[in-house]
Image (tube, rainbow, N blue to C red):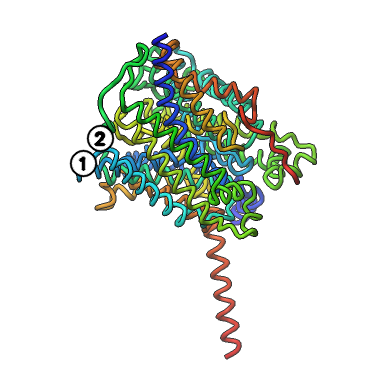
Amino acid sequence: MDKGKNKLIQLYKSKKPYSDYIVFGILLIILPILVDLGIVKYSYLTTIASILIFSIVALGLNLLVGYSGLISLGTAGFMGLGTYLAAYITKDLNLPFEISLLISVLVPMVIGILTGLVSLRIEGYYLAIATLAISEILRKGFVEFEAVTNGFSGKQASYPTLLGFIELGRNGSFIMIVVFLIGIMILTYNLINSYTGRALSTMRGSEAAAQAMGINIFKYRLLSFAIAVAYSAIGGVLYMHFVKYTYPNAWTLTLSLNLLAVIIIGGVRSIPGTILGSFIVFGVPDLILKRLPIIGDIDGAAYIFNGVLIIIIILFYPLGLIHIRNDLKKLMFKFKKRKESYSEQA
Amino acid sequence: MSIFIQILLNSLETGGVYALAALGIILIFRTSNTTNYAQGSISMFNAFIATYILMGTGLPAFAVAILGMLSAFLVGVLVDRIVIARAQNVNPVSKQIITLGLIMIFLGLAPMLFGTDPLQFPRFIYGAHTIMGANISYNAILNIVIGIVIMIFLFIMLQKSKWGLAVRATASNDIVARMMGIPTPLITMGSWAIAAALGTLAALMIAPTSSVNLSMMDGVQIIALLACVLGGFQTFYGPVVAAYIIGFASNFISFYISSIWSDSILYVLILITILFKPNGLFGKKIVKKV
């Protein structure tokens, strides 16, 4: 018995990031059970589900911002496109969830790649401007194509049905989101440590050096943007099937900026950092700020909180809050050492 | 013919608004080396301040506009002193993200201070005139003239004055300019202040038709950025000329093709143009040295 336990710990330690992700996933899966038992409030489940969905989207954005040094301001637009496509395909066309997922990810990706083809050939900041314009066009489309999108009143969908016969409820959908999140975390980790990831890292260090090594900068920029768009579309599909409601004003620049705040606050180029940032940006306002006496009544408080946090972190702590634990440890270590040396002298 | 003149006059007015906003963006881009995404929200914020002064004191609109520009000037100085001046050694991407953070702060502050209801801002003068069958209000004529005069003034200053020389030197090479004794922090601060004032003027020009609200500058901001892309980021005049071209195209499209989709068609057309002229209509190719 004891030996078996040791083996488990050894397995955990040898497969380090993967086992961490899976343990995190298992902890999350326990949550709906706690809700059913009445220990955790139902509203927390919804909040945490949306935090997880936004984490998926932010992971893609983190790849884009962290490794390619590009900013996308169209994240919300692409996510919105994903929600509308998912709703239209499953509800109006009555096609299965799997096909809907495929199409809802492919269509935004094609639009994203076209945008990238136009704007990525020149300077990096062109992409931000182009995506800003594209997301406005998309939002206009959400309002105007009433036959598909139902205009301002918004569109509804239901919980997904997997493989045509497994009907998921609220808890099932939550577990599906967790599975998607863990899968994407592992995928992203592998991607970063693959040839592609190394090429992206080289580009980040010096574009000229990367070019000299034979790395096609345009190709890798386009690839990372396509991945970011795909992740946001996946996030959109999951959002549609969990929240079950979408409307044009949910997909404004506000959301894109919040998603950018997620990665800056949590930690650029860090997968756990993205999750942490998502909990801070989307969780803190819902779970804490709104419950405070005076600040909770102010409309823009959460937004100002995130904006100020972005600027402070870029100026004073550019690696993000995920590194705070290590830095504190180092500080403690230093402090201890100094104390010891003092006591030795005395 | 009269329709064409009508479109031309309208485009001069909207083009002027876009050009003022674009000039602010390019001024900051050249001196601070960052695209300022917060230009629109800073202008919106100060348009609210101007409207509050108007409601509180009952001063005439043009006096309020000058006060609003002064407050924008102050806000620009504050933004530069508190945030941008400290971000000298931050990499370009993070600098852009800082301006995105500024959007969040101003968009959060505005409803907190001024409420969420849209407010009305009056025209500078009332009345209209007919030129060759085209109807144009005195206010539009005034806007066109103010826009052109301010821009000509700024361009003469940029080319002839000592300040202009300092700005151009900072724009071309920040470090060498500092070595030559140019106070570059002051120049950067000045461009943030002037850009904010120009943006606020643009906001107050469109305020009578669109009302003062949180999203009043969203469209202008996107078009001003696209004007910089279309005109090229390397010159001061490129974005301004491009802004007038976009103003004309926008009115032309909304009259002849579709008024609902005019902005969307415009964005796509501009993006297609970049495909063929990657450095903009007036841009030069930048050769990067390693």
Tag 2 residue: B119
The reply to the same-chain question for discs 2 and 1 is yes
Toward which corner of the image does residue B228 lie, by quadrant?
top right
Residue sitting at x 32%, y 16%: B130
Residue at the farthest top position: B1
Q: Amino acid at mark 1?
A: Met
- Discs 2/1, front: 1
The image quadrant where one finds the C terminus of chain A is bottom right
Query: In the image, is residue A211 above or below residue B183?
Result: above
Could you tell me residue B83's position as x and y percent?
47, 54
Could you tell me residue B110's position as x and y percent?
32, 43
* Distance (Cα) linking label 2 and label 1: 10 Å
Q: Which badge, 2 or 1, is on the more N-terminal residue?
A: 1
Contact, mark 2 vs mark 1 (Cβ under 8 Å): yes
Query: Callout 2: few (<14), some (14-19), or many (20+) C-alpha neighbours within 10 Å?
Result: some
Name the secondary structure under disc 2.
loop
Query: In the image, is residue A163 above or below residue A320?
Result: above
What is the chain identity of the residue bearing mark 2? Answer: B
What is the chain identity of the residue bearing mark 1? Answer: B
Name the secondary structure under disc 1.
helix
Could you tell me residue B143's position as x and y percent?
37, 30
Which of A213/B61 is in front? B61
Q: Amino acid at mark 2?
A: Leu
Which of B42/B251 is in front? B251
Can residue A285 be spotted in the picture?
Answer: yes
Could you tell me residue B187's position as x and y percent?
52, 53
Query: Callout 1: few (<14), some (14-19), or many (20+) C-alpha neighbours within 10 Å?
Result: some
Can residue A272 be spotted in the picture?
Answer: no
Residue sitting at x 53%, y 29%: B241
Residue sitting at x 42%, y 40%: B198
Tag 1 residue: B55
Which of B37/A116 is in front? B37
